[in-house]
């Protein structure tokens, strides 16, 4: 067993130590990764990473009001690597400062250190979620979105401007995302109009906001306020896609059955509920080889479901027929249609 004479700081004379652990390292070193964020413009939280030191070291954060080193306030809620100022703490979070200045003081038995940090206040603000998102003037292809000011900014606590970002997409097709944005004064509600929507479609709207910084840098977005809205129904926009050969015919004992085929409209463009097709047909009379003259009997409409083919039976095998296929929903039909002539 050995003993040694160790000079210990803050002691007048060196002391003998036997079978003891003596920490040997450095005076307080600078911390790294110092960051702050203002959550909801009501909670200022700062974090940092403290270096390893075998000598017990403590760090204390002070904020310098209006960057004045003579007016410093010790962090009220503190633990290693963390500090929090809130509106209800003593001392409280001061909101009306363009810059935030801090001094981080480290101390151990070997000495002290001081680090200073200066942050642009508007660049670290993460606004609260918008209090509400409501819809008005809902139409077939457009909707107006009314967005409230986030909590903590409705009474001009923040003097700058806000940007509201609206991400929207059909609920059934989340990859078809689009974006609109609108800027307002921080204490004013926002109104955004979204156009070029698909009728009879439920859309999901994700609304966030952020501070417009003086430097032009992107600031921190709020969490999203999510809402859904369904556009009004409308007649389909597209005529059925057919070709002259898109039918088949069978004749048995003087009677003929004809099966018509067409391409379906895409689900997202059905534009309404109870979507289906209407088949209209009439005889086509040709008296001579050189003179064509249409002789129309009354149209015979047949309503069919949302299918892509239909068979009509008991037809005269010696008569030419013109078929018209129409897209319909809720008894409203599209004007444009495609015909199968001379079946």
Image (cartoon, rainbow, N blue to C red):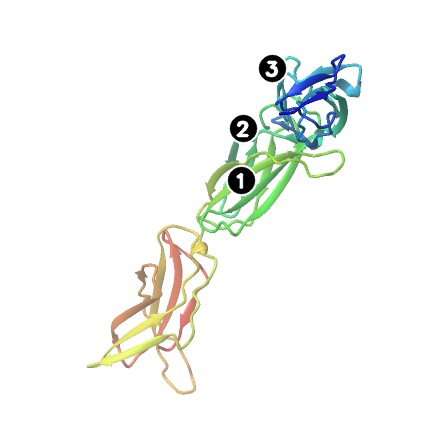
Pick whichever, 55 or 182, lies toward us. Answer: 55
The percent coordinates of residue 282 (x first, y second) are: 33, 71
Q: Is residue 19 visible?
A: yes
Near mark 1 (Cα within 10 A), the count class, few <14, some 14-19 or many ≥20, is: some
Disc nearer the start of the sequence (1/2): 2
In the image, residue 243 lies at what x, y percent?
Answer: 43, 74
Position above or below: 213 against 335: above
The reply to whether residue 42 is in sight is no
Q: Which quadrant, please, contains the N terminus?
A: top right
Q: Nearer the viewer, residue 167 or 141?
A: 167
Residue 131 bears which disc, if any? 2
Q: How far from the left and from the top, in percent, is residue 323?
A: 36, 70
Q: Residue at x 32, y 70 (%)?
A: 297
Q: Farthest residue to the bottom: give it.
A: 289
- Residue at horizontal 62%, vertical 20%? 78
In this rendering, position of residue 7 left or right of residue 321: right
Residue closer to the observer: 289 or 95: 95
Q: Secondary structure at mark 2?
A: loop
Which image quarter holds the C terminus?
A: bottom left
Quarter of the view holding residue 317: bottom left
Q: Quadrant of residue 144?
A: top right
User: Which residue matches tag 1?
Assistant: 206
> Residue 174, image x and y in percent?
49, 49
Give the CA distance from mark 3 to mark 2. 22 Å
**Crowd class of label 2 (few under 14; some 14 to 19; many from 20; radius 10 Å):** few
Q: Which residue is mark 3?
A: 88
Which residue is at a point 41% across and 81% down the rendered structure image? 292
């Amino acid at each position: 067993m050995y003993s040694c004479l160790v000079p210990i700081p803050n002691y007048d004379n060196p002391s003998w130590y036997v079978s003891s652990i003596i920490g040997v390292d450095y005076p307080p070193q600078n911390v790294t990764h110092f960051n702050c964020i203002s959550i909801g413009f009501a909670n200022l939280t700062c974090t940092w990473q403290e270096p390893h030191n075998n000598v017990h070291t403590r760090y204390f954060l002070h904020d310098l009001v209006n960057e004045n080193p003579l007016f410093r306030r010790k962090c009220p809620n503190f633990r290693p690597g963390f500090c929090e100022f809130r509106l209800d703490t003593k001392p409280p979070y001061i909101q009306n400062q363009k810059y935030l200045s801090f001094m981080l003081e480290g101390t151990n038995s070997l000495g002290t250190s001081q680090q200073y940090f200066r942050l642009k206040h508007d660049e670290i603000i993460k606004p609260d979620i918008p209090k509400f998102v409501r819809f008005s003037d809902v139409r077939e292809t457009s909707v107006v979105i009314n967005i409230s000011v986030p909590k903590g900014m409705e009474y001009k606590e923040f003097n700058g401007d806000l940007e509201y970002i609206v991400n929207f997409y059909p609920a059934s097709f989340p990859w078809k995302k689009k974006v609109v944005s609108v800027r307002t004064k921080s204490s004013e509600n926002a109104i955004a109009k979204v156009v070029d929507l698909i009728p009879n479609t439920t859309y999901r709207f994700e609304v966030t906001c952020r501070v417009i910084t003086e430097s032009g840098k992107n600031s921190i977005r709020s969490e999203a306020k999510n809402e859904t809205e369904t556009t009004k129904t409308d007649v389909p926009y597209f005529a059925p896609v057919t070709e002259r050969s898109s039918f088949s015919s069978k004749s048995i004992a003087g009677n003929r059955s004809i099966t018509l085929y067409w391409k379906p409209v895409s689900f997202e463009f059905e534009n309404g509920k109870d979507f289906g097709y209407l088949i209209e047909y009439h005889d086509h009379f040709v008296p001579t080889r050189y003179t064509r003259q249409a002789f129309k009997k009354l149209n015979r409409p047949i309503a069919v479901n949302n299918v892509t083919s239909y068979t009509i039976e008991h037809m005269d095998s010696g008569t030419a027929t013109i078929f018209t296929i129409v897209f319909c929903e809720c008894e409203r039909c599209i004007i444009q249609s495609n015909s199968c002539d001379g079946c």
